[in-house]
Amino acid sequence: MKKVLITGAAGFIGSHLCDRFIREGYHVIGMDNLITGNLKNIEHLFPLEHFEYYHHDVSKFVHIPGNLDYILHFASPASPIDYLKMPIQTLKVGSLGTHNLLGLAKSKNARILIASTSEVYGDPLVHPQTEEYWGMAYHTYHGLETRIVRIFNTYGPRMRMEDGRVLPAFFTQAIRGEGLTVFGDGSQTRSFCYVDDLVEGIYRLLLSDYPYPVNLGNPSEITILEFAQEILRLVGNSKAFIDYRPLPVDDPKQRKPDISKAQSLLQWEPGVNRSEGLEKTYAYFASIVDK
Ligand code: UDP
């Protein structure tokens, strides 16, 4: 039985990865320090024989007894609000944490997959964004088997309500009958990928032999204003409305992944359209938001 370590296991994407690897018949070690993760996201896995949970901060030395086949590093605060609240922990998990896990991968001869964010493309001048638009030593110098997923906006059940991201904000506001806080005139675009599609892409990338960054995201692009209107229609709360707010500085004007690399290397593309994905996500938020 293959053994996989998933860091950030109690987080949004990490918890969905735990589910997937359990379903595929792996022994899963989930690690989290719970600064933004929530045990509720993985408590259904606790009774399983092949799931173990380690409460640990990966910016400290990581010890795993026995053999290890794969490491997926998904531990990090993951929204601008969280980065501002926890700047040091964010830097430490991305630097010291990544370094510790690379060292662990080297000592166990394990393959490691690291999550990168489409934020590296900034306010992009090339549209859609390819992996080459921006520029690994462990791969080059130590021959380590690295995989790098570059994640574009992703949504789905278990997203954190209080992290300031647009989708949890809009659902919470629509359900409570408040204003949906559209920043600027809402003409900036994003492209939203349903979490199950992302997880499928990550699974394929891990098992592929490609060591460089690969974009994963849904190229279906929408303005933030249209997105707010879709959520208003879906929730159907007549008290909710659009509430324009100032645009944050450095807010990228547009974002859309070029996924040709994933299509050709992994035969992957998203299969869940926005209306289906939003329905499933609405069911989740309806169950956790107090009205
Ligand atoms: N946004 C918004 N209202 C909110 C939160 C976000 O209009 O309450 C906008 C934000 O300015 C950005 C887009 O939604 O243009 C996506 O923001 P998010 O923080 O979710 O992700 P990112 O900027 O990383 O794509």
Image (tube, helix red, strand yellow):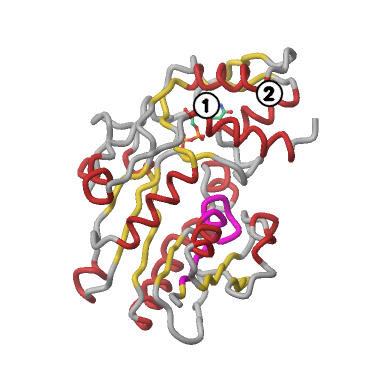
Near-viewer residue (136 or 291)? 291
- Up-down: is 215 above or below 73? above
Which residue is the extreme one toward the right? 291
Q: Is mark 2 within 8 Å of ligand 1?
A: no
- Examine the image and state in which quarter residue 137 appears: bottom left
Residue 80 covered by magenta stretch = no
Residue at image point 52% right, 51% down: 13
User: Where residue 255 sits: x, y (%)?
Assistant: 36, 31
Q: Is residue 237 left or right of residue 206?
A: right
- Examine the image and state in which quarter residue 131 appears: top left
Crowding near the residue tagged with mark 1, few <14, some 14–19, many ≥20 C-alpha atoms within 10 Å: few
Q: Is residue 217 left or right of residue 29?
A: left
Secondary structure of the residue carrying tag 2 is helix
User: Where residue 31 sits: x, y (%)?
Assistant: 56, 68
Residue at image point 55% right, 19% down: 230
Viewport quadrant of the N terminus: bottom left
* Residue at the spot of label 2: 174
Magenta residues, as a range? 4-16
User: Where residue 24 sits: x, y (%)?
Assistant: 47, 63
Disc 2 to disc 1, how far (Cα)?
16 Å
- Up-down: is 29 above or below 113? below
Viewport quadrant of the C terminus: top right
* Numbered badge on residue 275: 1
